[in-house]
Image (cartoon, grey):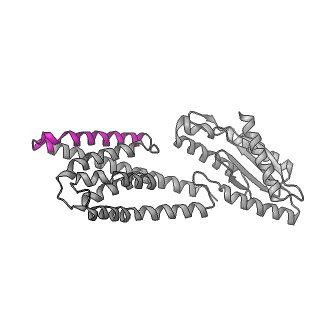
Amino acid sequence: MSSSTTATRARERRRLANRKTLIMLLATLVLATYALWRYLVGDYSHILTPVLATLLMGIATALHLLDEEQPLPAYLALIGGYLMLALEAPSAHIGMSLWLGLPSILTLLLLPLAPAMLLNVVLAPLWLWLLGQPDDNFGEVLRYVCLLLVASQPFVINNLQSGVMRMTASEEVECNAYNARTGQQRLTSEAARASALEQPLSILVIYLPQLEMLGEQFGEDRRIECLSSACDVMQGISRQGDLLCRSDKATFWLMLPNTGEAGALIMRERLTAALAATTQPETGSIIAHARLVNYKAGDTVQKLEQRLLAAQLTLMDLNE
């Protein structure tokens, strides 16, 4: 496994973020043009809503440029869209289902699937009332439900596909390492191979304490950058047959097949020195604590994994 997968994922995230930024900029421009048109035609009684929507969309765009991970820009953009819909919907003809579909699609585009569906259901009476639909108009209610179900289908399918990919993926999404599930599978196979061939097996439990606080103090982008750099360094130090697996948020297992205690200790020193020589903006050198766990003849996979987890807990306790 190389760093190309991580780089590809990073490029894909950047491409999606740039696409969202472009859409928000275009939406801001459209709202500003609409507000200007209201001003030019002298419709001053309806100019306040598009002006407020333009301001909200502009603020949302600026916040999205500053931090692509925070959800606030999406909610601000949604509020601006709702204001415009509330302004235009009462002037629509009765029975125009197009206006019923717009809030549903807008909410699905800006929010995750679960809160988007909940919000669409809660706001359904509001949109029906703004469109002048009577409370007992079962046909319009049914039409709204059908529109919501049809509009949500692509998002439901995408969520299902993403869930299947996460369940079957062997690599980490955020860095160049195997995930915990794959790590447990490889631990079983490596222990069986060491037992069958009577070869040594050493495992380094590596704890990176900076990852625990980077997200809160400097944002998710800085945490992912530090995590990706640390994994690249560890992969660069490792040999071809070594296996780097991420056990949890800040802990890794580096499996060293056919490696005794002396060789594993040398690898530990090289690895911690290489990480210390790698500096990150605002945080300096990457700090790493590592403990060695050796496979012993007659060990079951459960016993070996228990020793690994105990070493992991010890490293965390020492850092507190």
Q: Which secondary structure dominates the residues rendered in magenta?
A: helix
In the rendered view, does 61 fall on the left or right side of 268? left
Q: Residue at x 77, y 40 (%)?
A: 314
Q: Residue at x 62, y 40 (%)?
A: 211
User: Magenta stretch?
Assistant: 38-66
- The location of residue 310, given as percent across then percent down, is 78, 45
Toward the left, the furthest residue is: 42
- The location of residue 196, given as percent across then percent down, is 86, 66
- Looking at the picture, does residue 42 appear above or below residue 108? above
In the rendered view, does 229 fall on the left or right side of 88? right
Of the 4 image quadrants, the one containing the C terminus is: top right
In the rendered view, does 28 fall on the left or right side of 152? left
| Residue 108: quadrant of the picture | bottom left
Asked if the magenta segment contains residue 234, the reply would be no
Q: Residue at x 69, y 46 (%)?
A: 251
In the rendered view, does 158 fall on the left or right side of 31? right
- The location of residue 298, given as percent across then percent down, is 89, 59
- The location of residue 146, given as percent across then percent down, is 34, 65
**Number of marks in the image?**
0
Of the 4 image quadrants, the one containing the N terminus is: bottom right
| Residue 317: quadrant of the picture | top right
- In this view, the residue in front, 284 or 319, is 319
- In this view, the residue in front, 101 or 121, is 121
Q: Residue at x 29, y 50 (%)?
A: 126
| Residue 312: quadrant of the picture | top right
